[in-house]
Image (tube, grey):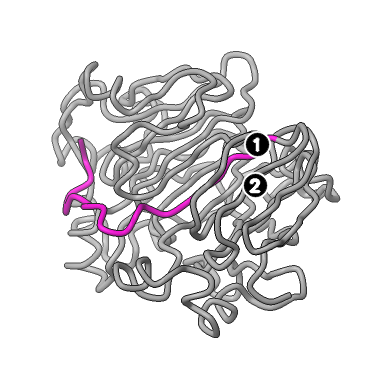
Amino acid sequence: MGTHPQLLPRNQLHHFYLGGQRISAFRGAGVDAAGRQPEEWIGSMTTMASDRRYGHSRLADGTLLTDAVANDPAGWLGERHLDAYGPATELLVKLIDAGQRLPVHVHPDRAFARRHLGLSHGKTEAWVILSVEAGAGVRLGFADTMHRAEVRALVDRQDSTALVGSLRPVPVSPGDGVLVPAGVPHCIDAGVFLLELQEPTDLSILLEWTGFAVDGRADGHLGLGFDLALEALRYDALEDGELASLVLRGQRDTLLPAAADAYFRADRVRAGTVLEPGFAVLLVTGGAGELRTAAGDRLDLRHGDAAIVPFRAGTWWLLGTVEVVACRPARPGATVPDRAAP
């Protein structure tokens, strides 16, 4: 297929929690009867921590995106991106269908990942809400400042009620954007369907795992043990002003809070808007139409499609009624704080 805009085949993955039917319905694909394909990784050059065989995305002709970028990094990413970040997209995009409440967990920031895991990225992430069942929401940050020994005791005895109750509930609606800085504990209620942008890692520290198909005592601490892994957690309360800065409400063209720009960008794009050259992962959220580029490419799009646009395509725009979410890495030169908590 070469370095051109193209549709992406489905890359729906098995995981330790239930879900996947909403992804299958959205993407127009078959449903996993077991109900354990709750994530689709889109435009991914990242593999799952639990099984390195899975996670990488393929292009329309079956080529791994990882191989395509390695063969033509300038065509896919552009020279300014390469100078700033090297031959990596700096981005992982997912669809997540919470068929059950996700466990309370936390992701390490870059300073922790560099010091203890030898990695250059942590896992700050953000959510664009696609649909929500009545009464469902997300939970973000401790409501009251916690002490490390207190949290460790809850983890050791797997007190799910107390762990979930310690977090701040956040009601969400379709179109809302939520930034989740690394270090902030969080979970997602059953019935939430969302698009996630994140740093390109699969780093999660589980605070609970009872009722999930995972052995958290063995696999919930990144191989570090909980004494060390829990140093990644932000223990102070997430105050009202901080929480408000992490949530962007309503049907806007810019979908994420401004603080997300240091990591990634998500924008709603309709006909009439011209996008600058650069690597982008697209999710078609409505309508049908055509993508055209300055390089002369044309790509038909319809609701539920996922697509990828390389730098070499040049500027691009949409025709018709099609509406997409364009997910892009940070602009070259964006400054990322060493610690991600607000």
Q: Circle 2 is placed at which residue position? A: 38
Could you say which disc has been placed on residue 230 in the image?
none
- In this rendering, position of residue 173 left or right of residue 109: right
Mark-to-mark CA distance, 2 and 1 = 7 Å
> On the rendered image, what quadrant is the N terminus found in?
bottom right
Work out whether 168 lies above or below 223. Answer: above
N-term mark: 2 or 1: 2
Q: Quadrant of residue 229?
A: bottom left
Residue 194 is situated, as x and y percent measured from the top left of the image, at 58, 36
The foreground one among 294 and 46 is 294
**Element assignment for label 1:** loop
Three-letter residue code for mark 1:
Gly
Q: Quadrant of residue 167?
A: top left
Residue 21 is situated, as x and y percent measured from the top left of the image, at 76, 40
Q: Quadrant of residue 268?
A: top right
User: What residue is rendered at 38% in x and 25% in y?
Assistant: 247
Work out whether 201 lies above or below 262. Answer: below
